[in-house]
Each structure stands twice: as structure tokens, then as C-alpha cells.
Image: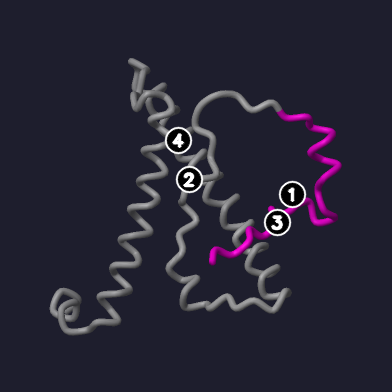
């Protein structure tokens, strides 16, 4: 039934394409996170390999959760400022992008400074809005 419905129903095709794109962005994030370890499962024993895979899953879920939370804050702020944020357009956005992730190197964090910058709900402040391109 579903295979026959696919070519005939444009709305259904768009829904499937959107799901495939989100799935691919998730796989891309996982590949990027794994490639930071040079794309290799380095352990010899199955238990250690499984542990590395679980760590990759945990890290991927952490990035997606972080991005989802801050997308929600950004959308709420946009709407509070009176800017349009169309729900139909937002349905096409995947929280699995990785432009904000540092895959390599070390980040030094001053914990007390970072904690002092959190708002009452415990979130970091959003970056200021970039000027619109003309």
C-alpha cells in the first residue's frame, strides 16, 4: 500500500523526503563525531568496541538535545520580538547539524564564569542576531 501511495501522493513524498534528509543529517553528524577519532573503532575486544559505539551514541544524542533546546529558545525569542517563525518551515529543520561543534582540539572553560552567565532557567544567552544581508 505504501509503495503504491508514494508516486501518487506529493504530500506523502515530501514527508518521506523530509524524514530521509533528517536521517542523513543524523548520520552525517555521527560520521563527523567518529572522524574526530580518525574514523576508527580502535579496540580489539567486542566489549570495548561496544563501549566506544555507546559513547558515540551518547555524544550524538547530547549534540541533538543541546541543539533542540537552543532552537526552541531561539524560536521563542524570535516570536517574542514579533518575527515570523512558520511551523511548516520549522518542520524541515534538523537538530543534527554540526556547524556549532568543535570536533578537534581542546576547549578551556572557566566554570565559574560560565555559570555566572546562565540565565535564571539555567541556559546560556543566545548570540545576538546577525544583521540581515542586503
Mark 4 in CB contact with mark 3 (< 8 angstroms): no
Secondary structure, mark 3, is loop
Residue identified by numbered label 1: 124
Quadrant in which the N terminus appears: bottom left
Residue identified by numbered label 2: 98
As displayed, is residue 37 above or below residue 119? above
| Left or right: where 70 falls relative to 59 | right
Lower position in the chain sequence, tag 1 or tag 2: 2
- CA distance for labels 2 and 3: 20 Å
Q: How many marks?
A: 4
In this rendering, the label closer to the viewer, 4 or 1: 1
Q: Residue at x 52, y 50 (%)?
A: 64
- CA distance for labels 2 and 4: 14 Å
Residue identified by numbered label 3: 128
**57 inside magenta stretch:** no
Secondary structure, mark 2, is loop
Q: How is the image coloured?
A: one colour
- CA distance for labels 1 and 2: 18 Å
Give me the disc on residue 56.
4
Q: Nearer the viewer, residue 12 or 43?
A: 12
Amino acid at each position: 500500500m505504501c509503495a503504491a501511495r508514494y508516486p501518487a501522493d506529493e504530500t506523502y513524498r515530501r514527508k518521506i523526503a523530509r524524514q530521509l534528509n533528517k536521517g542523513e543529517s543524523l548520520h552525517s553528524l555521527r560520521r563527523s563525531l567518529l572522524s574526530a577519532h580518525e574514523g576508527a573503532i580502535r579496540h580489539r575486544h567486542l566489549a570495548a568496541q561496544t563501549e566506544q559505539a555507546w559513547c558515540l551514541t551518547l555524544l550524538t544524542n547530547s549534540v541533538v538535545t543541546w541543539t533542540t533546546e537552543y532552537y526552541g529558545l531561539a524560536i521563542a525569542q524570535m516570536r517574542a520580538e514579533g518575527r515570523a517563525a512558520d511551523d511548516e518551515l520549522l518542520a524541515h529543520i534538523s537538530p543534527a547539524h554540526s556547524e556549532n561543534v568543535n570536533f578537534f582540539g581542546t576547549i578551556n572553560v572557566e566554570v565559574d564564569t560560565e555559570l555566572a552567565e546562565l540565565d535564571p532557567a539555567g541556559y546560556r544567552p543566545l548570540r545576538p542576531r546577525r544583521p540581515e544581508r542586503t
